Image (cartoon, rainbow, N blue to C red):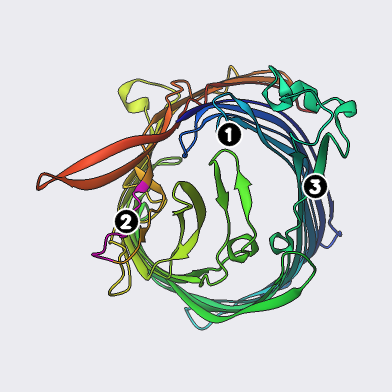
Amino acid sequence: RSTDDQYSQDARLGTLLNFTYQPRNQQHRYEWKNIFNQTGKNRYTERRGFNGQNDQEHNMEYYYSSRTTYNTQFAGKHTFDNSRWDWSAGYAYANRNLPDRKRIELNDRTDDRMGLYRISREFTYLEEHIASANLNYRSDLQWGNLQPVIKAGAYGEYRTRTYNTRQFDLSYNPTNTTLPKEFQFTDNPIEELLKPENYGADKLYLQEEVNKLNDYNGNNAQASGYLSANLPLGALSLYAGARYEYSRMELVMNTRSYEESRRSTFYTYSDLFPSLNATYQLSKQQQLRLAYGQSINRPEFRELSTSVFYDFDLASSVMGNASLKAAYIHNLDLRYEWYPSAGELFSVALFYKRFSNPIEWTYTVSGGTDLIYSYKNAKGADNYGIEIDIRKNLDFIGLRNFSWSFNGSFIKSLVTFEVGSQEKSREMQGQSPYIINTGLFYQQPEWGLNAAVLYNRIGKRIVGVGRSVGTSGSDDAKTIPNSYEMPRNAIDLSLGKKFGHWELKVSVRDLLAEKVTFKQIDNVTVKGQIKSVEEVTKQYKPGRNYGLTVSYNF
């Protein structure tokens, strides 16, 4: 039970540079697109309270992190009498640098007094390169009264990633030191740690905790191709196709912690994904849609790597799972759409999703009280529900220039497990039972004025899946409850005004600033009766965000 105070300073730089070449004949078009982003963050977090061992603690984390992304793409479009070609070739680069993350821990574990217990410094670097290319073809045919459209294409991608981390612990031997007696119990040991004269073989010294198991390299090659056809049959239009994907991932990790000892593990996928989209035109303003498609969610490098990273916010370690399987999803959607006038919409949809081997974010207990977060496959899951989407002009009730939008979903989800598993069927991790988004908008073009009020709410959802450990029916059997994010209301406001070439925008995000609350919820048996027990595990108030934007349009 502890309280955090967190301070952060962010800097962002973004540049965009695009070129387009259009020859006179208008049949060909060439584009070169470039986008670069650089972000930096300084963050300091201070934690006071009690840890899982009931030690009084005073912990600190300080780090600077930087993230760089660059994407360039060269593309072309070519139009002929009854056919079109488009292609692109691109390169993307990303890195994340954590050059010196410091974690300082003081507690009363070894003495009744608060004293220096542990200091670590971590240096982490991640780098990724992606090269990709794609080619698409479209042909407009004429078969009597039929005008089918044939599409085909191919895509290829090669990605590499390197992740390296080193950790150093600050060591201190109170029996062999020239530092002041009981140095670790001084009033402000943190200040003393910053003095160079306090470092040496008989003082404070850094010792590397070598663990090559936390480093990894990854390579992934992917090739895919698709073929589809759009067949209009009067009021009925059919769009059907299939996409083939081949993916081969290589994850290279060390087998020994004290030296380079690389071993490769390969994950190969070869899949065919069908799709069908049928649209029936009821009238000029109304239509029915029926869609089916199959998709895949393949594990990423970080989800497969058993590299361990300590997350200070979670106060827990995070690691991957090398035995993760890819998740396959069948998607079915039936939708009615009505467009009363330009800019207006009413639609209602029934949907169903069937998951095989869904990947979920889970946690378990290590050492009695320490949590470890990771990823795990369930056997399957079913999601189904209804979605309503409305966009309506409010002139009919006298509110000229006002419009209203609403999007709401009600979802039922159920995760299933293998026969004999101790896991219980439950809602899917990350899936809310309902989602509500609505907004009121005002547009006055003559005055160059626009305003909006937005409201959002999500239902209670599982953010961390608990686990059943031990042997069922034995004394060591334990159930770790699921962790839930509780519902909260969010309101955003924005106002914009144009003054010639200038535009001024002001905004307030999360006006209500309600607390974000996480709870563990479980059913327990008390005197033969089942009761629901709730306990807050984490809670914070994100605060309001105020924005001011001034722009000039040339």
Q: Is residue 29 visible?
A: yes
Q: Indicate which disc, 2 or 3, sits on the residue closer to the N terminus.
A: 3
Q: Is residue 371 above or below residue 119?
A: below
Magenta range: 472-482
User: Quadrant location of residue 545?
Assistant: top right
User: Quadrant location of residue 399?
Assistant: top left
As measured in the structure, the alpha-carbon distance from the residue carrying label 1 to the one carrying label 3 is: 21 Å
Q: Mark 1 — residue?
A: 110
User: Considering the image in quadrants, where does the N terminus appear?
Assistant: top left
Q: Mark 2 — residue?
A: 478
Percent across and percent down for residue 213 are 69, 63
Answer few, some or many: residues within 10 Å of disc 3's Cα (few below 14, many 20 plus, some between 14 and 19). few
Residue drawn 27% across and 59% down?
475
As measured in the structure, the alpha-carbon distance from the residue carrying label 2 to the one carrying label 3 is: 38 Å
Name the secondary structure under disc 3.
strand
Residue 207, numbered circle: 3
Residue drawn 31% across and 66% down?
471
